[in-house]
Amino acid sequence: FYACGVVGMASGYVQVLITQYYTDYIYRPVKSIAKASESGHATNVIAGLAVGLESTFLPVLTISVSLLSAYWLGRSSGLKDADGLPNGGLFGTAVATMGMLSTAAYILAMDVFGPIADNAGGIVEMSGQPERVRDITDRLDAVG
């Protein structure tokens, strides 16, 4: 069942990478939405919807492969219930799910960073700081 946990943790890590790809301003999805925004509202909505629909494929694929792998690994362990029926697959998926959720606390803690950086940007703007300071807080805000 150790391997099931590793599969779950690897899946959680891949989910973070996928999320970063679809939300970071240096990658294609955000750039395509920004480019579409230059020509008007309708193209912005269409591009955003297209990227939103596209962004669901890899997470679904990752979770599906992880759960099927964990089920197979758990079932191959030979764990049986009182009637002699194999049920290690279900326990394997439970262990993988806990592995996927093991990083949830860190991810939630990082989500708090965005509003704080945004507030710092507002303070910098209202206090009349130089433009280079606002550039720094804008980059920090983009991270969060």
Image (spheres, helix red, strand yellow):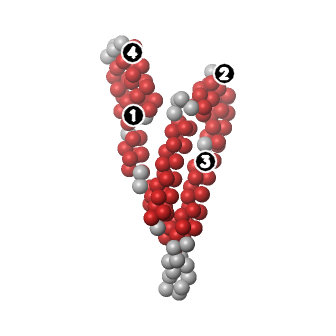
> Is 92 left, or right, of 104 in this rendering?
right
In space, the residues marked 2 and 3 are separated at their CA atoms by 29 Å
Residue carrying label 1: 115
In space, the residues marked 4 and 1 are separated at their CA atoms by 20 Å
- How many numbered marks appear? 4
Residue carrying label 4: 132
Q: Position of residue 17 (x, y in %)?
A: 51, 43
Q: Residue placed at 61% from the left, 40% from the top?
A: 52
- Which mark sits nearer the N-terminus, 4 or 3? 3
In space, the residues marked 2 and 1 are separated at their CA atoms by 29 Å
- Which mark sits nearer the N-terminus, 3 or 1? 3
Q: Is residue 92 above or below residue 16?
A: below
Screen quadrant of the C terminus: top left
In space, the residues marked 3 and 1 are separated at their CA atoms by 27 Å
Residue carrying label 2: 39
**Quadrant of residue 55 within the rendered picture:** top right
Residue count near mark 3 (Cα–Cα under 10 Å), binned few <14, some 14–19, many ≥20? some
Contact, mark 4 vs mark 1 (Cβ under 8 Å): no
**Residue 33 visible in this rendered orientation of the protein:** no
Q: Three-letter amino acid code at disc 3?
A: Leu
